Amino acid sequence: MVGKIRKNSARRREYHILFMVLTTAACYLLCWMPYGVVAMMATFGPPNIISPVASVVPSLLAKSSTVINPVIYILMNKQFYRCFLILFHCAHWSSKNGNTSVPSKTTVIPLNRRVYSNTVAQISTDALN
């Protein structure tokens, strides 16, 4: 029973990550495709087929791609969202949602170091066992 719940939870996380990756790829294509089409038409099409005014919009869309990527991550990744709030000191938003700190998955292993005359440093294996 527990294994099935973990499997379902893992599958749900994988689908969420897949959706985020597909959304990022789709937004990238939507932002850069018009620029690519206009560039190809201007390069290989008849002269003056693209006016300067018409070429501005695809250029701005392409440049907006750099802004859209972080927005997708903020909206679709809880950990990225919490770090974003902490980074920009949005304490009232994060504490309101009960997220006052970012959980850490770092494991600290204490190391005992002894300096001997014939070696620079030796690490005791007692702390690792």
Image: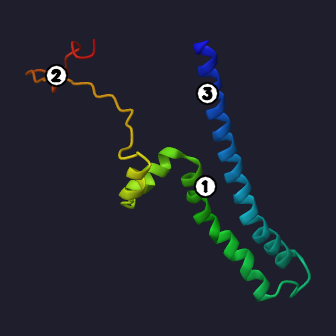
Say whether residue 103 is left or right of residue 43: left
Q: Amino acid at mark 2?
A: Asn
Query: Of the numbered discs in the image, which one, if any, rests on residue 112?
Result: 2
Q: Residue at x 51, y 45 (%)?
A: 78
- The residue sitting at the right extreme is 46
Q: Earlier in the sequence, mark 2 or mark 1?
A: 1
Say whether residue 71 is left or right of residue 80: right
Query: Of the numbered discs in the image, which one, if any, rests on residue 72?
Result: 1
Q: Position of residue 60 (x, y in %)?
A: 67, 76
- The residue sitting at the front extreme is 96
Say whether residue 95 is left or right of residue 58: left
Dividing the picture into quarters, in which one does residue 71 lie?
A: bottom right
Nearest the camera: 47 or 14? Answer: 14
Which one is in front in this view, the residue at disc 2 or the one at disc 1? Answer: 1
Q: Earlier in the sequence, mark 1 or mark 3?
A: 3
Q: Amino acid at mark 1?
A: Ile
3D distance between C-alphas at marks 1 and 3: 21 Å
Q: Residue at x 64, y 65 (%)?
A: 65
Q: Quadrant of the N terminus?
A: top right
Query: Of the numbered discs in the image, which one, if any, rests on residue 16?
Result: none
Residue identifier under label 3: 10
Q: Is residue 117 above or below residue 65?
A: above
The reply to whether callout 3 and callout 2 are in contact (CB within 8 Å) is: no
Q: Position of residue 127 (x, y in %)?
A: 22, 16
Q: Is residue 56 above or below residue 97?
A: below
Q: Residue at x 39, y 60 (%)?
A: 90
Dividing the picture into quarters, in which one does residue 124 lie?
A: top left
> How many residues crowd around disc 1 within 10 Å: few (fewer than 14), some, or many (20 or more)?
some
Q: Amino acid at mark 3?
A: Ala
SS under mark 3: helix
> How many residues crowd around disc 2 within 10 Å: few (fewer than 14), some, or many (20 or more)?
few
The reply to whether callout 1 and callout 3 are in contact (CB within 8 Å) is: no
